[in-house]
Image (tube, rainbow, N blue to C red):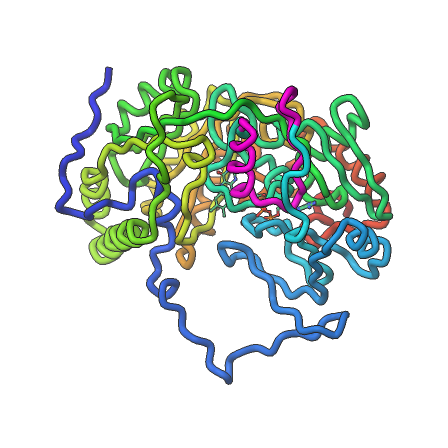
Amino acid sequence: MYSKFKLDRRDLLKGAALSIGTVGTLSACDQQQVAPKPASAKTKKPGIIGLDGRRVLPWSNWSGNQKSQPTLKKVPRSEAELVDLIKGAKQSIRCVGAGHSFSPLVPTDETLISLARLRGISNVDKVSKQVDIQAGTLLSKIGEPLWDKGLGLINMPDIDTQSLAGAIATSTHGTGNHLGSMSSDVVALELLDSNGEKHRCSAEQNSDLFYAACNNLGVLGVVTKVRMQAREKYLLKEESYVLRSSEAFEYAEQLRDDNRHFELFPFPHGDYIVVLLINETTEKAQGTTQLNIEQGEERDEAFRQVVKWTDAMPWLKSWIINMGLNSVEESVRIDRSYGIFGNLRNMRFNEMEYSVPAEKGLECVKEVMAKIAELNIDVVFPLELRYIKGDDVWLSPFYQRDSCSISCHNFQGRDYKNYFAAVEPIFWKYSGRPHWGKIHTLNADSLAKLYPKWQNFKDVRQQMDSRNLFLNKHLNALFVS
Ligand SMILES: Cc1cc2nc3c(=O)[nH]c(=O)nc-3n(C[C@H](O)[C@H](O)[C@H](O)COP(=O)(O)OP(=O)(O)OC[C@H]3O[C@@H](n4cnc5c(N)ncnc54)[C@H](O)[C@@H]3O)c2cc1C
């Protein structure tokens, strides 16, 4: 078997930010971001007075690469209020969850609706282990109440700050050879069409709507409730360590098959890869395992140092990154399932992700790494490789295909466009399907070729939104014009 890389050098980059829990946390290295300049009175833009006579602040997504100026922002207090809003709509509506999508799914200069007041778990069936959850509920608010009922979600992404409806809308996923995306754990949905009419759907009832709605991009209407398949509650043990790249790739498929969750973080310009394994355990939970603020800041600072040094001495980039990885300690965490999945992300980044056929994943990621090296692309942020089980959701990137997702990131404030443009064609070569919530440049024609049910989805969209209410420029170009 392989030998774990030496992890005892703590002098350089103490607590290096390259450890698993911080791969995303350590993203935005820009100092400007840490200490933003206060807007002077002169440069401060006045808010826009919206259609309802109130001041409307601009909207921006999590990473700041998507911005818009809605003329109306609404946060309905009840479903009845939401229905009235839809029925009385005089301009287009986009729903926003937690604003964690990097692609232009949400931006609108017309009406923006949030379901932030329609949250909570409304019903738990302990026999079927199915739970009804209000669409606006944040993933971070699901784990504990379910635990109290003896249940847990089957799988989750690597953060828990998204809303449930937002996560479902884009087939948000975690990793696990035998585990699907969150959309594949949906049992039934309720949504309002552009006339304010409520539709219920499941695999048995309105099945076309169901297979469309489980990855709906917010273009079929407003989702109000989601029934999720859960399971009995469980503890997880997460282990992470560093391997030489050659060994990590050699043993990747074995590790994938032998562990409930498996993930790789290959470092551009580096010779090592961080490996993450998560499995069920009966060992005692260690309590809160999330990084506390102080640890997070220490790690952020360590990573800023790496980036600062690679900026200052680009000819030593590989050496600095390898030394940083050399200081990463092997780590073990045990916690309730939801405590392990939900990582902190204090610092910001932009991301592109494609899913390729599972058996092509390693070949594809090696090609991406080679391209980064060949063009000497200025990136320190690791790639991320995960496995997801295929499903039957029409616009799921995992539609009828066991998949390997590969993500490329760069820190907020640093160039990501040239980086992504250089590697995106590699994903196309492998018939990659982009994550709907992340950056990509595919148009309707290219996407239609990747999705056998593209036209079926468009037909359902037309039925649900005959008024073309739930569109913005980006989605109009994909599904209408
Ligand atoms: C730090 C970070 C980490 C991430 N990690 C992962 C990960 O591990 N795995 C992964 O797959 N993705 C990941 N993502 C991507 C993210 O999970 C998806 O983009 C997700 O869709 C965002 O959910 P949200 O609640 O923020 O929704 P938003 O981004 O606000 O909206 C997404 C879509 O949902 C629609 N929508 C929201 N609410 C409703 C509603 N009630 N009815 C109808 N439509 C609605 C919106 O209109 C939009 O089309 C990550 C993103 C970030 C920023």
Q: Quadrant of residue 31?
A: bottom left
Quadrant placement of the N terminus: top left
Of 78 and 349, nearer the camera is 78
Counting from the top left corner in percent of width and height, residue 450 is at 64, 30
Asked if one can make out residue 36 in the rendered structure from this viewpoint, the answer is yes
Report the residue that reaches farthest toward the bottom.
Answer: 42
Residue drawn at (62%, 21%) of the image? 400
Asked if one can make out residue 440 in the rendered structure from this viewpoint, the answer is no
Position of residue 234 in the picture relative to residue 460 (left or right): left
Residue drawn at (81%, 51%) of the image? 80
Report the residue that reaches farthest toward the front.
Answer: 148
Counting from the top left corner in percent of width and height, residue 122 is at 68, 38
Q: Is residue 134 magenta?
A: yes
**Count of marks, rendered view:** 0
Of 177 and 74, nearer the camera is 74
Counting from the top left corner in percent of width and height, residue 59 is at 60, 62
Q: Is residue 88 above or below residue 147?
A: below
Residue drawn at (71%, 67%) of the image? 71
Q: Is residue 438 magenta?
A: no
Residue drawn at (40%, 56%) of the image? 414
Position of residue 476 in the picture relative to residue 308 (left or right): right
Q: Is residue 365 above or below residue 162?
A: above
* Residue extent of the magenta highlight: 125-151
Quick check: which quadrant has ligand 1? top right
Position of residue 386 in the picture relative to residue 303 (left or right): right
Counting from the top left corner in percent of width and height, residue 237 is at 36, 27
